Image: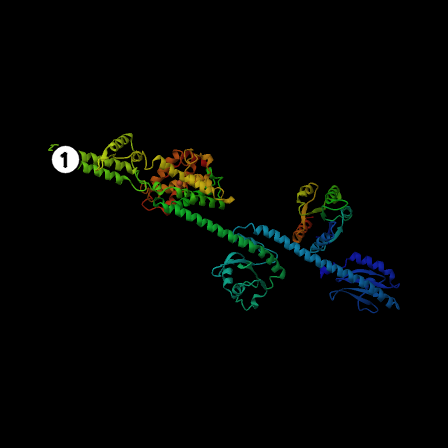
Amino acid sequence: MTQNTKIAIVDDEVHIRALLEQTLEDLEGEPEILMAANGAEGLALIEREHPQLVFLDVMMPLMNGYDVCAAVRRNPDLADTTIVMLTAKGQESDRLHGLDIGAHHFATKPFDPDEILELARRILRTS
Amino acid sequence: MSKTAGYLKEAWTRQQFELAYPLLPAGTAAAVWFGGKPLAAVGEGGAELSAGAPAVLSFDLRLEGEVLGTVLLRPPPGAAAAAAAWGDLLVHGLQGVIEAQYARHSVAQETLESYREMALLQRAVSELNHSLKPVTVAASLLKEFQGHKGATDFGAVFLRNADDGSYSALGAFGAAAEAACAALVQSRLFAAMDGQPQGDIVNDLAQSPLWAGEVAEFQSLLWLPLSVPGESLGLLVLAARRPEGFAAADLKRAQTLVSVASSALRNAQLYAAEQAMFQSFVRVIATAIDAKSPYTAGHCRRVPEIALMLAEKAHQAEHGPFAGFTLDDDERNALEIAAMLHDCGKVVTPEWVVDKSTKLESINNRLGLVALRFELLRRDALIGYYRAKAEGRPDAGQDYQNRLRQLDEDFALLETCNTGGEFVSPEHVERIRRIAATRWRTAGGEEFPLLDENEVYNLSVQRGTLNPEERKIIEDHVVHTIKMLSQIPFPRSLRNVTEYAGGHHERIDGRGYPRGLKREQLSIPARIMAIADIFEALTAPDRPYRKAGTLSWAIGVMHRMKQEGHIDGDLFDLFLSEGVYLAYAREHLADSQVDPVDVTPYLDSRESSSNLA
Ligand SMILES: [Fe+2]
Ligand SMILES: [Fe+2]
């Protein structure tokens, strides 16, 4: 993991952002953690900062996670950005749709911190 | 300390600093350090400021008494008071942010711990609750610690015997785990754990007065009781080869898992107890059926042995007709239960039919009554002789002799027919009818036929001792077996018991009973049942209708049954080629029965060649 590793958290719920941020602080190499509170802001952040990894909530105001994901996937500059969709329990049926539009992974909220860390490590190691 | 560094974000702090800087007396240099790092510096020489240098004002940033950072100011001469006021205000603001961040982190940490525990529980619950056997529960629990990042070197689940309070290992991992378990149970430390409501960590075993180095490698240890309300089930013991091998978080994690494992273990134990009770019920019924008739004694106990031996060979076969046949634990259990209960319908079959060793037997053998009537006729003949002699007839003696010979011959015929050992021809039936027509007289002069209708009917039975109605009663035992077993709400794993048990008198050509099912309609275990039933009956010690048969005779009879389409040829070949008959015979038959058998002529050459294909 290089010093300028960037991870973006895009979620409208402040407690999810806080919890994810704190979870990711346990990552080695102190990656820079960027945050956005809605889809439109999130897409702008991703296009500006080119994070290696994005945690993207599905249900958000202004622009939902799938639309953000689709927009990221349409942008060839962001081909190296890995997207982890955050779904609430019960939304798992939407996963197929997410995979369809190019999300790489899914995590169900409430998430298992160890699982998130493991997933982030795996993704950042190969990116 | 690296976590606390995040309480003040660099970008935000710098912005804050720059916004406030114009309020300082002109010419002031200022810097803020936090978590050992410079976050911001303004004014000439700001980056080089250090605490304790001349004319430098320093303000601590604290969290719960601990100094985490410093704000440094070097005002120009005469501006110290104004700079100090500025410093107080800024520190007050930053201090508030640090405390808020600290509170947020603490709440988040707590929440994340709950998330962790919940995720662990979710995973553990589904895994542990899927274990129906105590040993699987122990294995699932231990798996959570084996190779876990805590580097636990040894783990074991000990089960407490409720009767005598002794402990035995139900599962363990680690080097020389078995020996370690044995040594551990003997230790005073282990004795001290017994009955404790809560577990603990022993971080330096060498210092423990209860530990005498029973397992030399163990340096630290974690233990927890497995219990459900009101009952202690056992203990979980983890050990490490280094001191301080376990932390409070490890104990908490283990507690979470143990709470789930305890109820799973309890359930598994209850399930095992239910299973054991069901098994013994089945055994009791099998024993009752066997005990009902001395002639079938041991049948229900031996048929399962043969059936399971043959089924096992079919399961193991990798080529030939049984390559695709497998038998899992549930199916094995189902076959065993079916084999034990296959004749349970016999509890409603009248014993006198089951045991009917002669044709005139009902509750007792009526040949005695017939013999008595013959005795009367002999007496009548003797009286006739005296009477003829008194009348002076010259041939009286000869007539008497002829009459006696006739009676002896007739009775001998009835006696022979009665045993069922010989085929009764139409000529024999004719003679029986003629004998029956002979009349005997009471002292009062009333006349009766020598044999009544029922006696004639029974004696005329061509083969064996049973008349058609009685044969039906015997055959009906399978119907009763099926009816009885259909009443039992077998769980899914045993849903085939009735089919297996109810098919043991079916023939693969469809001429069996009670349903007349054909080969394709019978499962392999049902066909195995038929072979096991016949083989046991043929080799059983003694039966009403014949003496104990030899092995070669039984195999010969069964080979004929295969040719006639009675039993499954593939299974019979397997029975011979895999030596099932011999393995069984060596263990269960009298030495006198086990004669040499050459099975090669019985094995179908066409089928053995197709097996190679
Ligand atoms: Fe039977
Ligand atoms: Fe039987």
User: Foreground residue, B347 or B607?
Assistant: B347
Q: Position of residue A31 (x, y in %)?
A: 72, 54
User: Foreground residue, B179 or B336?
Assistant: B336
- Marks counted in the figure total 1
Asked which colour scheme the image uses, the reply is rainbow
In the image: residue B188, left or right of residue B375? right
Q: Is mark 1 within 8 Å of ligand 1?
A: no
Is there any visible trace of residue B601 in the rendered image? no
Q: Position of residue B598 (x, y in %)?
A: 35, 39
Above or below, comparing residue B597 to residue B267 in the picture: above
In the picture, residue B63 is in which quadrant? Answer: bottom right
Q: Identify the element where label 1 is drawn.
A: helix
User: Foreground residue, B550 or B547?
Assistant: B547
- Residue marked by disc 1: B387
Q: Amino acid at mark 1?
A: Arg
In the picture, residue B542 is in which quadrant? Answer: top left
User: Foreground residue, A108 or B587?
Assistant: A108
Q: Position of residue B36 (x, y in %)?
A: 75, 62
Is there any visible trace of residue B264 in the rendered image? yes
Above or below, comparing residue B125 to residue B561 in the picture: below
Q: Report the residue at 75% width, 52% height from top.
A: A34
Q: Which chain does the numbered disc 1 sit on?
A: B
Q: Position of residue B495 (x, y in %)?
A: 49, 42
Decide: few, some or many residues near mark 1? Use Cα within 10 Å; few <14, some 14-19, many ≥20. Answer: few
Tell me the quarter of the image containing the N terminus of chain B. bottom right
In the picture, residue B33 is in which quadrant? Answer: bottom right
In the image: residue B85, left or right of residue B389? right
For ligand 1, which image quadrant applies? Answer: top left
